Structure formats: structure tokens, C-alpha cells
Image: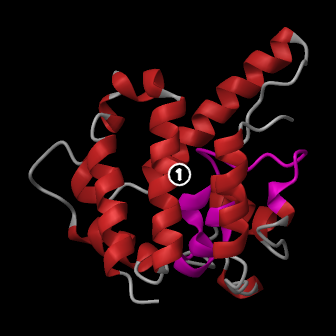
Amino acid sequence: MALNPSSKQLIEKIYIAFENVNYPGDKNIINNPGRGCLEHDETEAFFKGKTWKDLTKPDVSLPVNYADMNFLSSAAWRYYLPAYLIQALTDISDDTQQDAQQHLVFMLTRLQKHVVFQLTPPELYSHTNEIDPALIKNFKELTDSLSIEQSSIIAQFLELQRSEFPDDYADDIEFQSLNRIINYWKNKAKQSVS
């Protein structure tokens, strides 16, 4: 699969920035372990024992909307985030059959939007003035330990999504605030401690 130069450069930065993030451990893959929930079990089965680099291979499809990042523990979310970023940056412009190509584009669009949503602070996607404090607490748990470099890469990822796929975000109400989300991550990169 061919990558555009901007995506390729950002992927190289992702590998460097997340190189030393530790595997969360087999017993710390999912949030709320032992609930007996099928999605938790499938999430654990998919991620357990795999490095985030294992999940960047072209033949791997990351879970989106089912047994996905929402079920990962905070440590596992941070650990597997680079795999999601890299797969979302992958350009599907090779010469495959048209039906397969359309399916891949659809899946990539879902993945891209899933990753953008995961990186959106609750106060920026809420359509009401009432924000569940648990959502804010959870988001802080997921993102507070990201380094300056990692936060900066997230801002760059979001900027690239905006520039490469402007039509995907222009009309979608969940992503009308993409500029505010980018600014959030730019500010976070300035404030991060390590």
C-alpha cells in the first residue's frame, strides 16, 4: 500500500514517540475485567499478548465499533493508540478490485473517525451543557500520561486528517469542532509533563 509523504513522515514520528511505552500486561488489557461481557472477552482475546507494532501490519484489521478501544484499560488504550493512529493514516490507493477498494475505504473512514472520536475531550463532543463527570475523569485517565511528543503527534494526526479528508469532517456534526480538538491537543502538548 502506498502512503502519501505526510502520512509516512508522521508514521515514522509515531514509531519514535511510542517506542518506549510499556505493554500493559496480559491482566491489564481491558477495563472492568471479569464482567463476563462478550465484548470485553473479545477485546481481551484480540489484544492479549500482541504488541502495538504487531497490529500495524497490513493484514491486521483493528476492531472498530465492537470490541474496540472503548473496552481497553487506560494503560492498554495508551499502549495500542499508535497502532490505531498508524492504521488510520494508511492510504488505500493501491490497484485492488473496485469492490474490495470501496470496502477498504469504508472501513478506513470508520477507523479514522473512531480514532478522532477517541481523541476528543468529552466537553468538545457533548451537545448539551451537562457533561458526565465520569466521561471527563475517564478521558483524563486515558490521556494525562501522554508525553509532550505524543500529544504533539496527536495534534499532527488530527491536522493531517483535516487536510487530507476535509469533506469527511465538513458536514458531520460530531466533527464540526475538529479545529477546537486540534487546539486542545496543541495546548496539551505545551502542558504535558513527560
* 72, 149: nearer the viewer: 149
How packed is label 1: few (under 14 Cα within 10 Å), some, or many (20 or more)? many
Query: Residue at (35%, 63%) from the top-left corner?
Result: 186
Residue 18: within the magenta? Answer: no
Residue 47 seen in the current view: yes
Residue 124 on image: x %, y %: 25, 51
Residue 172 drawn at (x, y percent): 36, 27
Of 33 and 142, nearer the camera is 142
Q: Is 19 situated above or below 127?
A: below
Query: Residue 171, percent across and down?
Result: 34, 21
Residue found at x 72% / y 78%: 19
- The answer to whether residue 188 is left or right of residue 76 is left
Q: Is residue 85 above or below residue 111?
A: below
Does residue 30 appear anywhere in the picture? no
Residue 54 location, x and y as percent?
86, 64
For label 1, the residue is 157
Count of number-bearing discs: 1
Going by the image, does 192 lie left or right of 124?
A: right
Left-right relation of 125 to 155: left
Q: Is residue 81 magenta?
A: yes
Residue drawn at (90%, 13%) of the image: 97
Position of residue 127 in the picture relative to residue 55 (left or right): left
Residue type at mark 1 is Phe
In this picture the colour scheme is secondary structure
Query: Where's the N terminus, which quadrant?
Result: top right
Residue 50 occupies which quadrant of the picture?
A: bottom right
The stretch of residues the image draws in magenta is 55-82
> Under tag 1, what secondary structure?
helix
